[in-house]
Image (cartoon, rainbow, N blue to C red):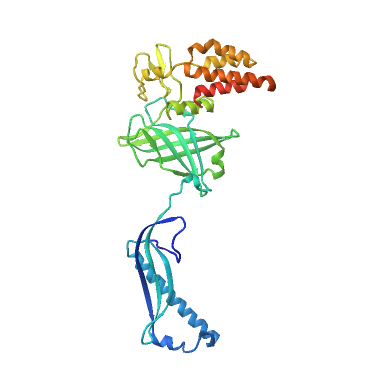
Amino acid sequence: MKEVLITSGTSFEGYDIVDYGTYKFTQTILNSNFLKDFGTSIADIATDRRDIYQEKIDEILNETINNFTDMVRETKYNAVVGFRTGVEEYTNNVTAVVASGTLVNIKEQYKSEFDKSSFIRNEIYVRNYYDLLVPRASKVVLASEGKGTKISVWFNNYNNDDIKALKAELQFTNIYGDNITLPDVDFTFDKTNLKLLKSDYVECKLPDKYIKMISSVKVYIKKYVKASGVYEIDADSIGIEMSDVKFKALKLKKGIDAVANYKSDGLVWTCNCGHVNEGGAEECVICGRKQDDMKNSITFNYEPMLEEMKTKEYVIEIKDVLMKYIKDIDTGMRMQLLEIMESGLNYEKSRGSMKDSVIEKVENLFLGL
């Protein structure tokens, strides 16, 4: 049954009026015998009889309102503004109870999930992967509007397979280091054959308050369904050991599925997706990234420099390390690095060693944060 909203005012909170219709009314005629009983005022009628009359009037009024609502349902409109009820007197002692109003179409106003006071959301990058040409869990989204927690997992679908469903175990770790496992969670997909699959939201048993406390997650895929059959993954997943800052920066720079930095020794090369390819391979056999593209994006390996900086005690020593590597660093970054050093030297005069702060700023600069 179509829902009809009715107001005596001119608008509905949380809705926009998108179309105005005509003014409509319905009426219920009161028979003459009933009206004759009102020859005197209601106040002059005995209390017990007055209650009976009031019940009868309420019954007729409700009937009229219901008839009016049913009439609206038969139209293309879904709401009424300026709604009124009353008693109309016609000729020949004919009286009717009338309900009236203007028909309108309304549409619920868009409200971003982030504007809802009860809305909680946490997006977490997955901390493990399979070095296989199978769906790769890249991100887990936890969300709640105060009525239980729902979960969605994003999968990189390298082979563009028509994946219909997927069963997985999710292992969460909270900020205290405690683990909680959700076994055998079934995920389905509204759209398939996409490079990035976002599962439909599934209700889970995590308390709402737990969402903000989740710090990491691992997804262990049990099996998945394609048009050609059901497939199981007979392999161990690989854990990702990387700081949160570096992990997030890697994702932002290299893609949501990235789990490793590119490196090569001439014989083999490691792709951003983590797969180790033969040295002569032009592109990764798992994700399709081209080796030349990754080579061209690598300008300076800053990690050895950072490790050497960490062995020093004061900024002046850290600056000496920088100067040893500076000729290999992109020209655009040199000035920013020197400014970090000068700022650290100035603060160190009054605040003591600024080693940790300076190294953090240097690392963030290379990570693009």
In the rendered structure, the answer to whether residue 324 lies left or right of residue 268 reads: right
The number of discs equals: 0
Say which residue appears at 50% left-offset and 24% top-offset.
367
- Residue 93 location, quadrant: bottom left
Say which residue appears at 53% left-offset and 88% top-offset.
44
The picture places residue 325, in percent across and down from the top left corner, at: 52, 12
The picture places residue 229, in percent across and down from the top left corner, at: 32, 35
Say which residue appears at 40% left-offset and 14% top-offset.
268
Say which residue appears at 54% left-offset and 10% top-offset.
324
The picture places residue 85, in percent across and down from the top left corner, at: 43, 73
Question: Which quadrant would the N terminus be assigned to in this image?
Answer: bottom left
Is residue 1 in sight in this rendering?
A: no
In the rendered structure, the answer to whether residue 200 lies left or right of residue 214 reads: left
Q: Is residue 228 above or below residue 323?
A: below
Q: Is residue 42 above or below residue 177?
A: below
Q: Residue furthest left?
A: 228
The picture places residue 343, in percent across and down from the top left corner, at: 61, 21
Front-most of residues 121 and 226: 121
- Residue 5 location, quadrant: bottom left
Front-most of residues 337 and 51: 337
Front-most of residues 231 and 198: 198
- Residue 201 location, quadrant: top left
Is residue 136 in sight in this rendering?
A: yes
